[in-house]
């Protein structure tokens, strides 16, 4: 199965379930940037429940911009905020210290474009998981791509998330219960080397 997805910020679990089961993962590179999507947002499990990490972007007067043209607004200290939020949320998780040195540099080096940063985040996660995805990139936009299962809808942050993922132990689950489909970071810090087994055992369907 070939799948097409949007590169997103530390993709959620549904994204990774779709990618890990694919023979080829095609990244959509030619779409327009849309607000309030996982392109610049990830959700983690904080001390007060579900917490959004948003990357600020430079706004434009143009109605439509290509995703790859959108710049990060680095005047805001968002990297410091995101790193502190991750440390606060996951410092007591079983595997945070194990992966911290891999993740931390992403919040210490400035990147100009959101798409480039998201691809970098994905590369780091794949290295942590020792996951070798067969990746290609689009060079034109197709509304109905041929020969590919279209999972681009997963980038819509406001769309109903899959609720049938199996629960795993989360740091604050005793306070708020299991929260499904968070960023891959939540699964990685809590499950460590078992992350791949978990992803492989889950299923996801197109709408």
Image (spheres, helix red, strand yellow):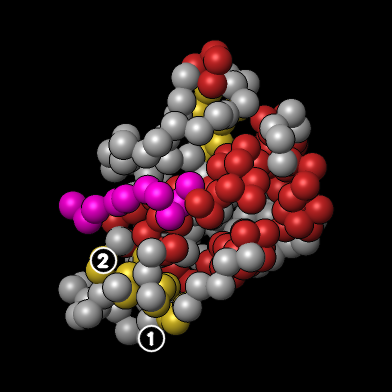
Q: Range of the magenta residues?
A: 198-207
Which residue sits at x=40%, y=49%?
A: 201
Q: Secondary structure at mark 2?
A: strand
Most common SS among magenta residues: loop
Q: Is residue 15 above or below residue 44?
A: below
In three-dimensional space, the C-alpha distance between marks 1 and 2, rounded to whole angstroms, equals 16 Å
Residue 135 percent across, percent down from the top left: 47, 78
Residue 117 showing in the rendered view: no
Classed neighbour count for the residue bearing mark 1: other residues with Cα under 10 Å, few (<14), some (14–19), many (≥20) = few
Q: Is residue 122 above or below residue 12?
A: below
Residue 168 percent across, percent down from the top left: 50, 33
Which residue sits at x=29%, y=78%?
A: 141
Which residue sits at x=62%, y=37%?
A: 190
- Apparent side of residue 27 relative to residue 75 in the rendered image (left or right): left
Assess whether residue 130 is covered by the magenta stretch: no
Based on the displayed image, in which of its 4 quarters is residue 123 positioned?
A: bottom right
**Which label is found at residue 139?**
1
165 or 194: which is nearer to us? 194
**Which label is found at residue 150?**
2
Assess whether residue 204 is covered by the magenta stretch: yes
Tag 1–tag 2 contact (CB < 8 Å): no
Residue 205 showing in the rendered view: yes
Pick whichever of labels 1 and 2 is earlier in the sequence.
1
């Amino acid at each position: 199965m070939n799948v097409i997805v949007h590169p997103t910020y530390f993709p959620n679990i549904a994204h990774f379930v779709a990618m890990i089961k694919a023979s080829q993962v095609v990244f959509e590179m030619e779409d327009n940037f849309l607000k309030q999507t996982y392109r610049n947002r990830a959700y983690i499990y904080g001390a007060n429940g579900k917490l959004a990490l948003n990357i600020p972007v430079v706004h434009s007067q143009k109605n439509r911009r290509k995703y790859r043209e959108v710049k990060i607004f680095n005047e805001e200290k968002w990297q410091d905020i995101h790193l502190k939020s991750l440390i606060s949320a996951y410092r007591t998780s079983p595997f945070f210290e194990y992966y911290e040195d891999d993740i931390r540099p992403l919040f210490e080096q400035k990147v100009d474009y959101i798409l480039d940063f998201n691809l970098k985040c994905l590369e780091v996660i794949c290295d942590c998981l020792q996951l070798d995805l067969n990746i290609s990139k689009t060079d034109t936009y197709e509304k109905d791509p041929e020969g590919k299962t279209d999972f681009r809808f997963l980038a819509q942050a406001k769309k109903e998330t899959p609720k049938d993922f199996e629960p795993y132990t989360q740091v604050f689950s005793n306070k708020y219960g299991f929260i499904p489909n968070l960023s891959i970071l939540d699964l990685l810090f809590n499950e460590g080397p078992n992350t791949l087994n978990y992803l492989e055992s889950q299923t996801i369907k197109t709408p």
